[in-house]
């Protein structure tokens, strides 16, 4: 498929789970047959733009978070890997996207968030979801997710069906832009004001993956038998060099004692008549245009990697991709707002 640009997608339900799922997924109607030909590891999660997916479903302040997960990604994971009444965890829940999609789907959810500003918005989004008829229960705990065992009740151990989360890409991301007299200015492009360096986003790649390993280890202890961890991530380039965050996350998961079982793709582009309809940010589009003008054949970002782990059984090998439906993900050209 080729990528083209479009800004006015047709009206579809942005929260309806997509039909293309990875290997051995669970749906609300029970386990799916492993020989169904239409089951793919590509998740069509951007048939509508991020703002359209959030409109009315989330409070307006949600847009200020610099790295929001697409609601359709969280919704797809929840529907694919859990049943109604299951417990879902997001150890870095931000504005609460995973929690909101879980309770709308009749699951219960708990989130951990380091930054009080974002956890307050997550609380507000949960309240807003309940006013819209969400039936699940959810709560947010303020604290450092690298210390999950000391933050969450011991009674949760062995009861979490699904973890959905994503590591930060650094202290700042592209955020939003506003045209002005002297050009384009960024805003809402940082996790905090920079005075608190305890956020995982302020670590280098080694520190980030070490911290994320601690988080995954804590999540693994909370998983029930057969429970699943879903992590979204994408590589980027820094000074022309590839920063392969997805591979670093897989390595962190293996060190945490988890088994990688699938590597899927969550589309950040819509699918229209056999084409990928890219939804680039201002900065991504600008970077690609400059690179192509200089003779470098860069392309628009159209997906995130979805890395799926399970806590291994006694006789399994944590370092293998067991029965996985894998999709290779190539390098991209810079971290963008997950919108």
Image (spheres, rainbow, N blue to C red):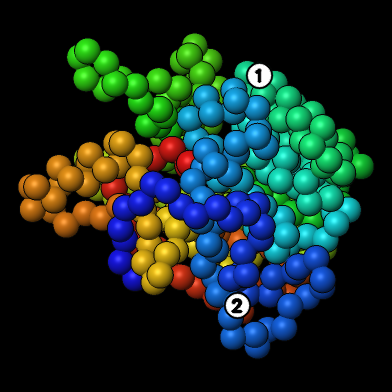
State which quarter of the image contains the N terminus: bottom left
**Position of residue 294 measured from the top left corner of the image (x, y, whole percent):** 7, 47
- Image: 197 above or below 14: above
Q: Residue at x 78, y 51 (%)?
A: 105
- Residue 246 at least partly seen: no
Q: What element carries label 2?
A: loop
Categorize mark 1 by other alpha carbons within 10 Å: few (<14), some (14-19), many (20+): some
Q: Is mark 1 on a helix, strand or loop?
A: helix
**Position of residue 164 measured from the top left corner of the image (x, y, whole percent):** 66, 49
User: Image check: 21 left or right of 152?
Assistant: left
**Position of residue 332 measured from the top left corner of the image (x, y, whole percent):** 32, 52
**Position of residue 138 measured from the top left corner of the image (x, y, whole percent):** 82, 37
- Residue at label 1? 116
Q: Which residue lies furthest to the left in this view?
A: 294
Q: In the rendered structure, which disc, 2 or 1, sits on the residue that comes first in sequence?
A: 2
**How far, Cα to Cα, is label 2 from label 1?**
40 Å
User: Image check: 106 left or right of 180?
Assistant: right
- Residue at label 2? 39
Q: Which residue is drawn at 63% across and 75% down?
A: 23
């Amino acid at each position: 498929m080729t990528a083209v640009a479009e800004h006015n997608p047709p009206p579809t339900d942005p929260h309806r789970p997509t039909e293309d799922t990875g290997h051995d997924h669970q749906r609300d109607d029970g386990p799916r047959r492993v020989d169904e030909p239409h089951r793919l590891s590509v998740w069509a999660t951007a048939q509508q733009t991020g703002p359209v997916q959030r409109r009315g479903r989330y409070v307006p302040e949600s847009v200020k978070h610099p790295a929001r997960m697409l609601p359709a990604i969280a919704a797809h994971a929840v529907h694919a890997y859990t049943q109604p009444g299951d417990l879902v965890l997001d150890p870095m829940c931000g504005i609460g996207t995973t929690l909101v999609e879980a309770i709308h789907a009749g699951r219960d959810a708990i989130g951990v968030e380091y930054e009080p500003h974002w956890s307050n918005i997550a609380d507000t989004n949960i309240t807003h979801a309940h006013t819209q008829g969400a039936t699940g229960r959810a709560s947010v705990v303020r604290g450092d997710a690298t210390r999950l065992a000391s933050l969450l009740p011991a009674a949760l151990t062995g009861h979490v069906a699904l973890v959905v989360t994503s590591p930060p890409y650094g202290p700042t991301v592209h955020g939003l832009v506003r045209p002005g007299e002297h050009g384009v200015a960024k805003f809402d492009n940082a996790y905090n004001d920079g005075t608190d360096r305890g956020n995982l986003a302020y670590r280098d790649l080694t520190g980030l993956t070490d911290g994320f390993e601690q988080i995954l280890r804590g999540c693994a202890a909370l998983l029930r038998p057969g429970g699943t961890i879903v992590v979204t991530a994408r590589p980027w380039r820094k000074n022309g060099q590839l920063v392969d965050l997805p591979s670093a996350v897989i390595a962190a998961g293996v060190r945490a004692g988890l088994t990688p079982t699938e590597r899927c793709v969550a589309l950040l582009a819509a699918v229209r008549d056999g084409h990928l309809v890219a939804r680039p940010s201002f900065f991504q589009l600008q970077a690609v245009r400059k690179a192509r003008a200089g003779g470098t054949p860069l392309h628009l970002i159209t997906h995130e990697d979805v890395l799926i782990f399970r806590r291994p059984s006694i006789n399994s090998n944590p370092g293998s991709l067991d029965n996985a439906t894998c999709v290779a993900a190539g390098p991209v050209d810079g971290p963008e707002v997950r919108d």
